[in-house]
Image: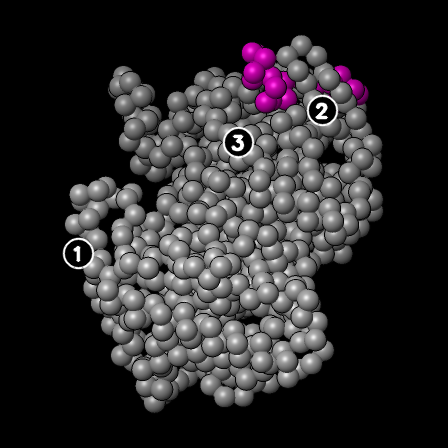
């Protein structure tokens, strides 16, 4: 193995790891006591660099993080290198797995930490990776570097010749969990289970309801009884030993067009490369390297592994009722081995704290596919935390350049269609195009008008981040963070991008933490009522009578930036609003059901803003116009402690901010009339001449 490869892969196992193994025979392995000691290994090309026990490794990680350190971590995360997910082909994965199997030289199941994981942040949670049926433990090989920055990561290695029953494996994992929980009782423990490992995670979680676990299950094999693998067990039992029955040959017996196409192509002599371009990536790659699989899983091992899958599925399903852990299911739509999508939906219904993310165009080996980043998935789902409860400020990790690039590519069409004009005000009062008037240093509070359906959010947040590298943390409705599984609110996966970009659920505590950490915060006093306004209410500020945010801003000396957003009336027109819907019994019942399901806000408010009923107005689309944003001159609150103590003074400041927002809206509505590129067609003509990356001009300032 080359030095560059060795630095990224655990190429050796210390002889100390094999001290519990007395024989490679089936009988002796069954009688061998499974050691609960875990080991961290790091190897170079020629030798083992260090081997330390789990106890020593954990002790080095037991650090306390104060407020200043949290701020430093957040700052470092925002400016750190972008650790792109390392892409390795399935061929490389299988070859390295084969090498690890050979070098491990048998022995009992044990834990290891890949060298490339590095050292995680202080107080990082523990992540235990439970592998698929092959058991090598390298299923997250593409994700080690990124995961190792935010988790203390251990991978379970189950030697190929090991015959430890499923229940004993579950006990091994349970003992590890209890031991680590005893050492660090305040940090959660993550169980990432792939296929067979998903069953193992469920079985262990059922036995440890008293421990704070987070389960992440990728295509769990709890559906084995309904899979195409189930019929292979009796076939293996009845076939004569003289037949060469290994995994490659058994794949030919499985139904499913992709597998048949692979095998038929090989039998007919067509080059395998021709088939690669036609079939799903994971199955083609598996078929491409059947010789490697044949060495890893000979007939006897295959029979044992399939029996293990059957046992794992039965045990995990029998214990589902006892699983109370927070769970995230990752389901592939093109899994040719298991009915993963249907199983994911079943588990989501059965488990009390479960969410699901679907990957319709992905295969069984989800973690090995291009475009899959487990860290991004965890962040988007809001599943990363370092304590018993998620802290939306200290636990938050800003998007990496790669993550933001993908987000921006997905929403690029919105910016292309609306061609937003961004104006800001410098300290001397001069209005300029661009966002130079937004202060770089926080805390900063952006307060403005909420367009119809929140249409302004995407161009506002992405353009500020893109132009100024300032991450604006939006105060969002709780429905984007929590949902009754049986309810009718939108699926939480729709808001994953919002969470990656820093949205937090509205609460006084979160507002306090954001300002205290010197963040840039986006606040809409009009909230949902303003975004779901009635006919004829375009650009009307529907704000509370009380000054909700001013006193908090003064307390931290935050700069308040009033802003206006204009353009919704050039995108669509409300033709069927809340009042119309409430006159129809069916829609009235739906609105009441949705509203009762969501967390109620402003229950003590008066006037229009108190009506936070959830509904979707009927909007008639228009030929796209243009969005305009105008950020007014920052209002300083530093040194205005009098307003903090005097409610009348703070209310005056509140009314000043509201008045400035109205002035920003009026300015934009007037000046856009002189914009020759307000409509889409002139902008398209301009782009056709100057290129689609050119900034389209607007009215003169």
Mark 1–mark 3 CB contact (< 8 Å):
no
Q: Secondary structure at mark 3?
A: loop
Question: Disc 3 and disc 2: Cα gap in Å?
Answer: 18 Å
Q: Is residue 115 positioned above or below 449 on the image?
A: above
609 vs 295, nearest the viewer:
609
Residue 98 picture location, percent across and down: 56, 19
Q: Please state which of the two labelled residues, at mark 1 or mark 2, is closer to the viewer.
A: 1
Between discs 1 and 2, the one toward the N terminus: 2
- Residue at image point 42% right, 43% down: 406
Real-space Cα separation, disc 1 to disc 3, in angstroms: 45 Å
> Would you name the residue on which mark 2 appears?
41
Toward the viewer: 101 or 21? 101
Q: Position of residue 170 (x, y in %)?
A: 70, 42
Question: Is residue 42 shown left or right of residue 300?
Answer: right
Q: Is residue 226 magenta?
A: no
| Label ID, residue 142 | 3
Q: Nearer the viewer, residue 572 or 188?
A: 572
**Dot 1: within a 10 Å radius of its alpha carbon, few (fewer than 14), some, or many (20 or more) residues?**
few
Give the residue drawn at x 57%, y 40%.
79
Query: Which residue is rendered at x = 36% and y = 51% of the image?
Result: 411
Mark sitting on residue 681? 1
CB contact under 8 Å: marks 3 and 2: no
Find residue 78 and report its image quarter.
top right
The extreme front residue here reads 428
Residue 624 badge: none
Q: Where does the magenta region start and end?
A: 1-19
């Amino acid at each position: 193995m080359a030095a560059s490869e060795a630095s990224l892969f655990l190429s050796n196992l210390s002889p100390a790891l094999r001290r519990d193994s007395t024989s490679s025979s089936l009988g002796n392995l069954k009688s061998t006591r499974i050691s609960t000691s875990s080991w961290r290994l790091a190897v170079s090309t020629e030798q083992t660099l260090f081997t330390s026990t789990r106890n020593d490794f954990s002790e080095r990680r037991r650090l306390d993080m104060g407020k200043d350190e949290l701020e430093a971590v957040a700052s470092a995360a925002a400016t750190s290198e972008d650790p792109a997910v390392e892409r390795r082909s399935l061929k490389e994965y299988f070859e390295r797995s084969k090498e690890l199997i050979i070098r491990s030289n048998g022995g009992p199941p044990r834990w290891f930490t890949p060298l490339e994981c590095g050292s995680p942040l202080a107080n990082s949670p523990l992540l235990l990776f439970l592998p698929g049926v092959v058991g090598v433990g390298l299923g997250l090989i593409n994700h080690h570097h990124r995961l190792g920055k935010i988790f203390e990561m251990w991978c379970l290695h189950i030697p190929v010749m090991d015959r430890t029953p499923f229940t004993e494996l579950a006990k091994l994992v349970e003992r590890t969990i209890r031991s680590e929980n005893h050492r660090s009782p305040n940090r959660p423990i993550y169980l990432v289970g792939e296929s067979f490992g998903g069953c193992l995670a469920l079985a262990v979680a059922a036995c440890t309801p008293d421990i704070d676990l987070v389960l992440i299950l990728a295509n769990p094999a709890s559906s084995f009884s309904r899979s195409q693998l189930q019929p292979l067990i009796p076939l293996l039992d009845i076939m004569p030993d003289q037949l060469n029955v290994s995994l490659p040959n058994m794949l030919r017996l499985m139904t499913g067009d992709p597998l048949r196409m692979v095998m038929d192509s090989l039998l007919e002599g067509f080059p395998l490369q021709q088939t690669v371009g036609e079939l799903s990536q994971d199955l083609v790659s598996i078929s491409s390297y059947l010789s490697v699989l044949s060495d890893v899983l000979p007939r006897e091992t295959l029979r044992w592994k399939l029996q293990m899958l059957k046992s794992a599925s039965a045990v995990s399903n029998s214990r589902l009722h006892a699983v109370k852990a927070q769970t995230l299911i990752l389901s592939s739509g093109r899994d040719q081995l298991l009915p993963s999508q249907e199983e994911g939906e079943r588990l989501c219904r059965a488990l009390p704290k479960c969410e699901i993310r679907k990957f319709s165009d992905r295969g069984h080996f989800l973690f090995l596919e291009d475009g899959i980043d487990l860290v991004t998935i965890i962040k988007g789902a809001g599943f990363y935390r370092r304590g018993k409860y998620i802290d939306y400020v200290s636990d938050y990790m800003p998007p990496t350049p790669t993550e933001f690039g993908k987000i921006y590519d997905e929403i690029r069409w919105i910016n292309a269609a609306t061609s937003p004009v961004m104006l800001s005000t410098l300290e001397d009062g001069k209005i300029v195009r661009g966002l130079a008037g937004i202060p770089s240093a926080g805390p900063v509070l952006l307060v403005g008008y909420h367009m119809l359906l929140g249409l302004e959010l995407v161009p506002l947040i992405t353009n500020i981040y893109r132009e100024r590298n300032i991450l604006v943390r939006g105060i969002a409705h709780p429905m984007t963070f929590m949902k009754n599984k049986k309810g009718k609110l939108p699926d939480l996966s729709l808001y994953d991008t919002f969470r990656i970009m820093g949205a937090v659920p509205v609460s006084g505590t979160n507002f306090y933490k954001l300002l205290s950490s010197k963040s840039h915060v986006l606040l809409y006093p009009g909230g949902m009522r303003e975004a779901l306004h009635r006919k004829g209410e375009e650009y009307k500020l529907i704000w509370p009578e009380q000054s909700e945010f001013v006193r908090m801003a003064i307390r931290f000396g935050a700069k308040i930036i009033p802003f206006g957003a204009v353009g919704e009336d050039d995108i669509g027109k409300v033709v069927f609003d809340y009042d119309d819907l409430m006159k129809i019994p069916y829609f009235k019942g739906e609105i009441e059901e949705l509203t009762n399901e969501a967390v109620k806000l402003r229950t003590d408010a008066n006037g229009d803003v108190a009506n936070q009923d959830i509904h979707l107005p009927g909007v008639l689309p228009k030929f796209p116009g243009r969005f305009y944003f105008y950020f007014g001159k920052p209002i300083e609150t530093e040194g205005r402690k009098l307003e903090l103590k005097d409610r009348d003074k703070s209310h005056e400041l509140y009314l000043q901010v509201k008045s400035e927002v109205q002035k920003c809206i009026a300015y934009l509505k007037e000046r856009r009339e002189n914009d020759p590129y307000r409509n889409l067609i002139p902008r398209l003509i301009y782009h056709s001449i100057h290129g689609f990356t050119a900034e389209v001009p607007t009215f003169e300032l």
